[in-house]
Image: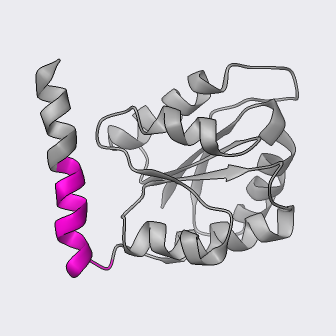
């Protein structure tokens, strides 16, 4: 699996922990920054990761900022992307199995590193279950197309 990962300065420490945790798995992981704790504009990193997932270069992405909210808002601006903020194992599971989210957003100031590793493991191990959720995800895509076609 090919995963893109990125963060702002608030998420830098947690990103480093998650990269170490993911290195022993069968994953091709690419770091989109930031590369230290210097302030950055998180929308730039969020955009780059989301575009790389949307264009199919990567299967999934992980974005980390202080709360996960800003990265999620940014990533969800990219057509075709479903990014979810997850701060517990249930939402991590449901974001994949029910919503087919391709990008996981985490808040480094909201959760600890052990919980973050658990959330990433759960999120990585689940696939879209389809079933009744298929019509809902298809409706999200349909709504998105309306606005894409207006531009």
Image height of 105 relative to 121, above or below: above
Q: Which residues are magenta?
A: 129-141
The image quadrant of residue 9 is top right
Side (left or right) of 69 relative to 61: right
Residue 70 location in percent, x, y? Answer: 61, 35
Image height of 102 relative to 52, above or below: below
Side (left or right) of 147 relative to 8: left
Side (left or right) of 42 relative to 127: right
Viewer-side residue, 119 vs 57: 119
The image quadrant of residue 92 is bottom right
Which quarter of the rendering shows the C terminus?
top left
Q: Which residue is found at the position 67% from the left and 52% from the top?
A: 106
Image height of 109 relative to 86, above or below: above
Residue 27 location in percent, x, y? Answer: 57, 61
Viewer-side residue, 35 vs 118: 118
Image height of 108 relative to 21, above or below: above
The image quadrant of residue 24 is bottom right
């Amino acid at each position: 699996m090919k995963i893109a990962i990125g963060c702002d300065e608030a998420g830098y420490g947690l990103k480093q922990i998650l990269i170490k945790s993911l290195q022993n798995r069968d994953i091709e992981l690419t770091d989109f920054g930031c590369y230290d704790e210097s302030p950055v504009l998180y929308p730039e990193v969020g955009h780059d990761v989301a575009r790389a997932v949307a264009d199919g270069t990567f299967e999934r992405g992980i974005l980390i900022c202080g709360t996960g909210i800003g990265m999620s808002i940014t990533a969800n601006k990219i057509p075709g992307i479903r990014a979810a903020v997850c701060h517990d194992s249930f939402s991590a599971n449901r974001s994949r199995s029910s919503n087919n989210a391709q990008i996981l957003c985490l808040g480094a100031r909201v959760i600890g590193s052990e919980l973050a590793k658990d959330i990433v493991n759960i999120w990585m191990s689940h696939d879209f279950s389809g079933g009744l959720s298929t019509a809902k995800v298809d409706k999200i895509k349909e709504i998105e197309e309306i606005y894409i076609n207006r531009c």
